[in-house]
Amino acid sequence: MTASPAPLPPDAAVVLVLGADDEVLGCTPGAEDLLGQPAARITGQRLDRLLEYREPGVALLTRPGHADPLRLRLSTVEVAGGGRTRRLATLTPEDTVHRHEEDQAVVRALFSQRLVGIAIHRADLLATRLNIRPEVLLRSTGNAGEPPSAGAAADAAGDIALPARIADMLVPDDAAAISDRMRQVVDSGEPIIDWEHSARLRDAPDTERVLSIQVFQLRDPGDRVQGAVSIFTDVTEQYIARRRMALLHAVAERIGATLDLASNAQELARVLVPGFADLAGVDISSRMLGGDEPDWTVPGAQLRRLGGETSRPQWPAEVYPPGARFLIEEFADPRLSDSRALRESWPDAVRTRRITLPGTDPGPAAHQLPQGAGSRMIVPLTARGQVLGALHLWRAPGRLPFTRQDAWLGEEIGSRAALSLDNARRYTREHRTVETLQRSLLPQPVVELTAARTAGSYVAARTAAGTGGTWYDVIPLSSARVAFVIGDIAGHGLNATATMGRLRTAVQTLADIDLAPEELLTRLDDLAIRLADAEHEPRDGTGAIGATCLYCVYDPVTGDCTMAGAGRVPPVVARPGQPPETVPLKAGPPLGVGGEPFESVRVRLEPDSWLLLFSDELVAARAGDGDILEPAEHTPEERMNLLRAEIAAAHGHTPAELGQSVLDALLPRRAPDSEVALLVARVRCLAEENTAHWSFAADPAVVGEARNAILGRLADWGLETNAFATELIVSELVTNAIRYAGGPVELRLIRDETLICEVSDPSETQPHLRRARPTDEGGRGLFLVAQLAHRWGSRYTTRGKTIWTEQLLEPEPG
């Protein structure tokens, strides 16, 4: 048995000193446990008596009577002082040797592979062993579609001289953060598992690189801290993918939540800053604010910075702030008409000129992005083949510049955001169309009549879903009377607006034939049913079915106001010197949904009394968000009290001023969920000296008396120029009443903006205008009346009918 000189192995369990004949001269402690004999018996025995050889050289030996294998290793050492040598036999349990070999194999495998980095650091964090150079991982995995920089593509760093600091390999910021965490592991022993952090190389600082790092503390057999081992893998692609997905999720979640253009644009800027950029500006065509098609590609088009956000404490002075308006002067790059993002270093891809309002300071802002150092990217916002505007992004110096991967992400974000902006634009156009049509069907806000001075207010809902179908009207009637109307349609949108126009026209037509309020609503109810049947409309509260209407007729001669309602809240009346009160009107069912008759109520209104008709939504309960009512009282009763308080405080107010104060009190901050209409009227009465009334028996002789009476009154009023026509009209109407209806015959003259003549009789037969033939003895009287009067007509009364005429007041001669 021979062996070459070799040092003692570090894994020795027992060492035997052998003599010339391989007898055991001595042994180390532990031999008794390993060999199963006392040390005294071991000493002096030959090695081949103690062990059973199984293999030559490094052999497997087995103790007699034992099955545990041992690993034998022979070596030679010099004995000090004599130049002699001694042989040593090292005995180690086989399982211990096997575990040691496995440990060595694992270490060799880790330090020989190139997919996972591993480094051993001393307690001062200097790296003493490193399986791969830092740039190898970057080149092997790539950077998510971005080609390596020149520094990374070549072996710029070369072989790293070990031991080396982390700061020798990574940029200072990343090196400091990783060193701090590793120091915590070395000091505390608490490991780091799957910690992701930026690890940009010093030779490629502009290339994004993220590592997943594990760090464990290292201790020697004496349990003393030796340092740490770090295991790291490049997860840049996964990190970018997760960040991309998180950003896209945030965009999908936060953009498009509303259909307001400004809110969507501002939210787009907020979602990108500071995670993706340090400054974001959203510029769109100003035409979109009104719902029109964008004109981004047209030089001279007006743009608006509708949204903007920055991570800086203050907005840069040279950059257009949110809300700024500017004109396109020139496109620096034709690609801006496409959907591709541009990563360039020019100051502005679109040359613009700021629009300044007269009397305002234009300020220093003249650019769309900060000037000087930094990284810029411009993403056209394209939807449905149209460029709506552009998203301008900027990253501050010291931050990674925009990469091709960022450009792809920006294009996807821009595509999604543009679709939301275009949806908001289309919704704005729809809302504007509905509101414009709705307002065009309403009368003038302020109406001046002899009977009343009125002011109507229409507040559109903040969404198209709540707009369309509410109306009010002021309709002049015969004999200086006036009708006040308010109503709404159950649905909303263009269909509801069209239905509202039909019902409003029907009300005006029915009012022209002077129907009583309850009779007018009965006719309107029948019309709603017929409209629904004609359009195959289900009777489920949409369209004309379920519409509501309140119809009031005020007579300034008598001061009587008669009203009836279909599914409406009653109006509020305020007489001079008295508190406001709600009219005790029992409203009937909505139009077309009930079979109950409509009932009317009559109230007396003194001159200068207030009459307010309003939508139910004005006094409906509101959510307690502080945006609808101040103070925070939200029940219908409390809102009615606030309405009455505003009326009571309206001393010296015009109807328009009172209407505005009511809206300010009940809708102070924002548009309501549903549209609101308010009609305010301040009634007047005709002075007694402007009316004259006579009653005659059914006797042909009284016709002359009637003529004399009206001629005298016309002379008193200074209307002699109207005497001839009025005399003929009265003679014809009174004669017809006596001949066909009997008595009594009532005659009334009213001096207003026109001269009104009324003849009432107990008959309910309406007169009909016809053209008499040459051989007819009669039938020309009513034709003569129609020729002499400016307007004429008839209406039913509780005691028969009234035929009325109106004549224009003739100016005095000379």
Image: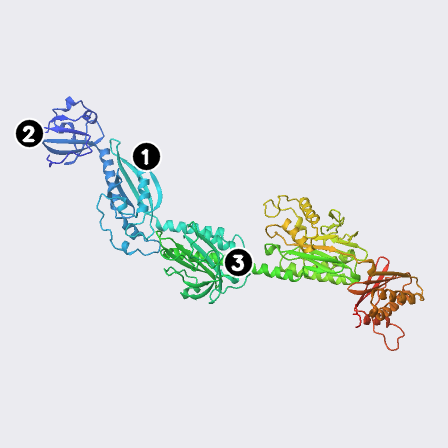
Circle 2 packing at 10 Å, graded few (<14), some (14-19), many (20+), is: few
Q: Is residue 628 above or below residue 124?
A: below
Pick the residue in front: 49 or 83.
83
Circle 1 packing at 10 Å, graded few (<14), some (14-19), many (20+), is: few
Pick the residue in front: 585 or 101.
585
Pick the residue in front: 145 or 758.
758
Q: Earlier in the sequence, mark 1 or mark 2?
A: 2
Instruction: Name the quadrant of the C terminus.
Output: bottom right
Between the C-alphas of marks 2 and 3, the distance is: 99 Å
The reply to whether the C-beta atoms of the residues labelled 1 and 2 are less than 8 Å apart is: no
The reply to whether the C-beta atoms of the residues labelled 3 and 1 are less than 8 Å apart is: no
- Residue 548 can be seen, yes or no: no
Mark in the foreground, 2 or 3: 3
Looking at the picture, how far across and down is residue 634, in whole percent? 64, 44
Query: Identity of the amino acid at label 1?
Result: Ser
Query: Identity of the amino acid at label 2?
Result: Gly
- Residue 134 can be seen, yes or no: yes
Residue hosting label 2:
81
Q: Earlier in the sequence, mark 2 or mark 3?
A: 2
Find residue 423 and name its label. Answer: 3
Q: Is residue 19 left or right of residue 436?
A: left
Find residue 798 and name its label. Answer: none
Looking at the picture, how far across and down is residue 623, in whole percent? 61, 45
Residue hosting label 1:
188
Q: Is residue 386 left or right of residue 535?
A: left
Looking at the picture, how far across and down is residue 656, in whole percent? 67, 56
- Secondary structure of the residue carrying numbered label 1: helix
